[in-house]
Image: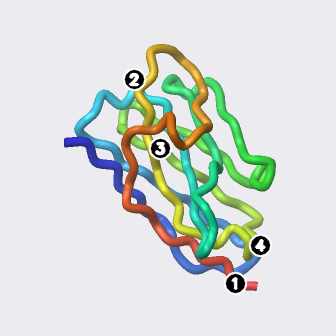
Amino acid sequence: QVQLVESGGGLVQAGGSLRLSCAASGLTFGLYAMAWFRQAPGKRREFVAAITRSGANTNYADSVKGRFSISRDNAKNAMYLQMNSLKPEDTAVYYCTAAPVDRDIIATMEWQYTYWGQGTQVTVSS
């Protein structure tokens, strides 16, 4: 049974930082492209950042470029999202997700992802 469990969310002031973690189990982690998506109240879920299965390449939404950094540790079956210079508009539930891929590619579309975590709430106060 595949499980993705996010942690590290919370309440932070604008300009602050948070580091999200995603712990994966039940899958061969190194064979999956990974990503973070987020969903704010009343809005559709949106792409935040993605990383190839090797970790060699990353991709970011324009809204977080230069502020967020995605990484992974295949030995620990874990993925991370370092979020700096947080803004109130970053407030959302953040989801960890995994896509089975047959080569080292980036996946940025929601439909490409098979497994999803339950999400962790990030709230940025102004």
| Three-letter code for the amino acid on which mark 2 is drawn | Leu
Q: Which residue is mark 4?
A: 15
Q: Quadrant of the N terminus?
A: top left
Residue farthest bottom in this picture: 126
- The disc at residue 79 is 3
Report whether 36 appears left or right of 68: left
Question: For mark 3, does the 10 Å Cα neighbourhood hold few (<14), some (14 to 19), or many (20 or more) residues?
Answer: many
Residue 31: x and y in percent read: 39, 23
Q: Quadrant of residue 115?
A: top left
Which of disc 2 and disc 1 is earlier in sequence?
Answer: 2
CA distance for labels 2 and 3: 13 Å
Check contact, mark 4 vs mark 3: CB within 8 A. Answer: no
SS category of the residue bearing label 4: loop
SS category of the residue bearing label 1: strand
SS category of the residue bearing label 3: strand
- The disc at residue 31 is 2
Which of disc 3 and disc 2 is earlier in sequence?
Answer: 2
Question: For mark 4, does the 10 Å Cα neighbourhood hold few (<14), some (14 to 19), or many (20 or more) residues?
Answer: some
| Three-letter code for the amino acid on which mark 3 is drawn | Met
Question: For mark 2, does the 10 Å Cα neighbourhood hold few (<14), some (14 to 19), or many (20 or more) residues?
Answer: some
Q: Which residue is mark 1?
A: 125
Taking the spot 76% from the left edge, 71% from the top edge, the residue there is: 87
Taking the spot 50% from the left edge, 71% from the top edge, the residue there is: 121
Which of disc 1 and disc 4 is earlier in sequence?
Answer: 4
